[in-house]
Image (cartoon, rainbow, N blue to C red):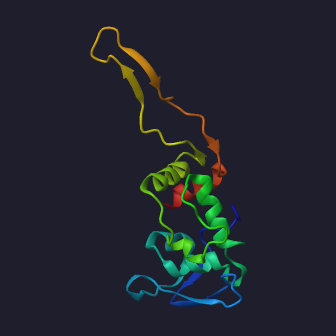
Amino acid sequence: EQGIDPNTKYVSEKKTYQVDVGTGKPETWKVQNYDGIVRGEISLKAALWKSDNTVFADLAMNTGGRGLKNGPEEIADVARRCGISTALPEHPKPSIVLGAYEVSPLDMTSAYATIANGGRRVEPTAISRVVSHEVDDDENVLYVAPEHPEGEQVIPEDVANEAIGIM
């Protein structure tokens, strides 16, 4: 949504940031990849494929002005629009980009489904049909979930399609 090219190069290496947490005393945030793997220069797209924590930390921290403006807040905003109902803080820590906040499997499924649906969010439906007297001849259908619920466009379709292509 902010126009960052997935082929933009970042440096995959151990990193340390000073994070303003609103107390006037910044906290130190150290980020590394699993098993301390360092990849050097790598594209954002390749970083997603390799689950490179350090590149996404740069993205959230807007390191060198090449990341997300208002990174953690923007990440939380997109998560909410995509269907994450977990109470994320108004000013989340940058570790949100690495999945530091607990999210239910249903919310995560809803968020990925929103992306897969071209950026259109649809409320999850667990019950497709409710019937009374199902075994009798006088069966009464009380509810049928819509086959193609309308939903709401929460991410531009071209952005969702780009994400799908990368994933």
The residue closer to the viewer here, 34 or 10, is 34
From this view, report whether residue 70 is shown above or below residue 31. above
Residue under the point 51% across and 90% down: 14
User: Horizontal and vertical percent for residue 13?
Assistant: 51, 88
Horizontal arrangement in the rendering, residue 34 relative to residue 42 (left or right): left
From this view, report whether residue 133 is shown above or below residue 165. above
Residue lying farthest top?
Answer: 137
Residue lying farthest left?
Answer: 135
The residue closer to the viewer here, 12 or 92, is 92
Q: Quadrant of the N terminus?
A: bottom right
User: Horizontal and vertical percent for residue 119?
Assistant: 60, 49
From this view, report whether residue 26 is shown above or below residue 77. below
User: Horizontal and vertical percent for residue 37?
Assistant: 42, 86
User: Horizontal and vertical percent for residue 9?
Assistant: 60, 78
Q: Quadrant of residue 25?
A: bottom right
The residue closer to the viewer here, 107 or 36, is 107
Horizontal arrangement in the rendering, residue 120 relative to residue 105 (left or right): right
Q: Quadrant of residue 87?
A: bottom right
Question: How many numbered tags mark residues here?
Answer: 0
Residue under the point 65% across and 49% down: 154
The residue closer to the viewer here, 132 or 51, is 132
Residue under the point 40% across and 25% down: 130
Residue under the point 62% across and 53% down: 81
Horizontal arrangement in the rendering, residue 65 relative to residue 9 (left or right): right
